[in-house]
Image: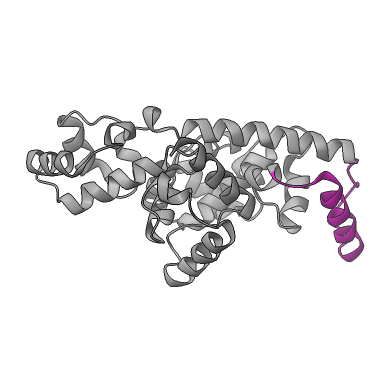
Amino acid sequence: MKIIEIEGVGEKYAKILEKAAIANVEDLIPLKWMEIKELAKTTSISLKLLEKWQDQTELMVIKGIGPEYSEVLNKIGIDSARELAYRNPKNTLDKIIALDKKQPDVVRKIPKIEDIEGWINKAKDLYNVKKTKTIPKETPIIELEGIGKKYGKTLEAAGFLDVESLIGLDRDGIKKLAEKTKISEKLIDKWAEHADLMRIGGIGPEYAEVINEIGIDSVKELAQRNPNNTLDRIVKLDKEKPDMYRKPPTLQMIEDWIEEAKKIK
């Protein structure tokens, strides 16, 4: 599928993305958070737009959805596989039918509930794969928010190759690493907090920074939080710092994070 088939890309952005070796929908899907940020820099396309398109590509490659139904799902508030994974099939169908009444030219054919159930199951599979990809042991140290190439090379030279290596650093360990690398203790402490939060499936580098920013600095602390209050604080953070993340997590996602935190703290 060509990149231009994503809703909102158009010829202008398609040409820019093609020059950056993103010619097909499949080229955008596997990009990690740091790679998306790098693509935003090289193409001068906003980070939020690129993330939105990446979310849409995940929907488009689910069997039976394609460009047409991805647009339909987008119009009823489902713009990613992650979002679709948490939806109820009947409620989703009802919303599509309501959309068809309001905008009869958008939906060519109403999908069957069995089709939607299949889409949701596939979305769950995709989302679960994405969650496992963020585990600290398999995440290079450079992917932690704020580390970048400069600090990444310094930490790697000190033997810290992946995110997991930062987990469990006590005050003495942070101090020794700071002395060895000439990186401030405050920065290393912040990265260690992000690493700890990334033990939770689905959090990853981006949400680790967001959760840390609202005052949650460990899995132990996350386990004690109220899901609704946590979501409210994340939404408030977006108003204060609109470029920190593209889209807030769903309430269900936060509930899952907290439940997992209770098990592993």
| Residue 29 location (% of width, % of height) | 55, 37
Looking at the image, what colour scheme do you see? one colour
Give the vertical position of 184 relative to 154 (above or below).
below
Q: Is 209 contained in the magenta span?
A: no
Q: Is residue 61 visible?
A: no
Against 155, residue 209 (above or below) is below
In the image, residue 22 above or below residue 11: above
- The verdict on residue 97 being magenta is yes
Apparent side of residue 6 relative to residue 204 in the rendered image (left or right) = right
**Residue in the picture at 51% in, 51% down:** 50
Q: In the image, what residue occupies the spot 51% across and 37% down?
A: 263
Q: Position of residue 86 (x, y in %)?
A: 70, 45
Q: Residue furthest bottom?
A: 240
* Figure disc tally: 0
Nearest to the observer: residue 17 or residue 69: 69
Residue 158 in sight here: yes
Camera-side residue: 252 or 168? 168
Quarter the C terminus occupies = top left
Q: Which span is picked out in magenta?
A: 86-112
Q: Is residue 89 left or right of residue 180?
A: right
Residue closest to the eye, 264 or 74: 264
Q: Which quadrant of the view contains residue 60?
A: top right
Residue 92 horizontal/vertical position (percent): 82, 50
Measuring from the top left, give residue 261's x and y in whole percent.
49, 42
Residue drawn at x 42%, y 44% as measured from the top left: 219
Quarter placement of the N terminus: top right
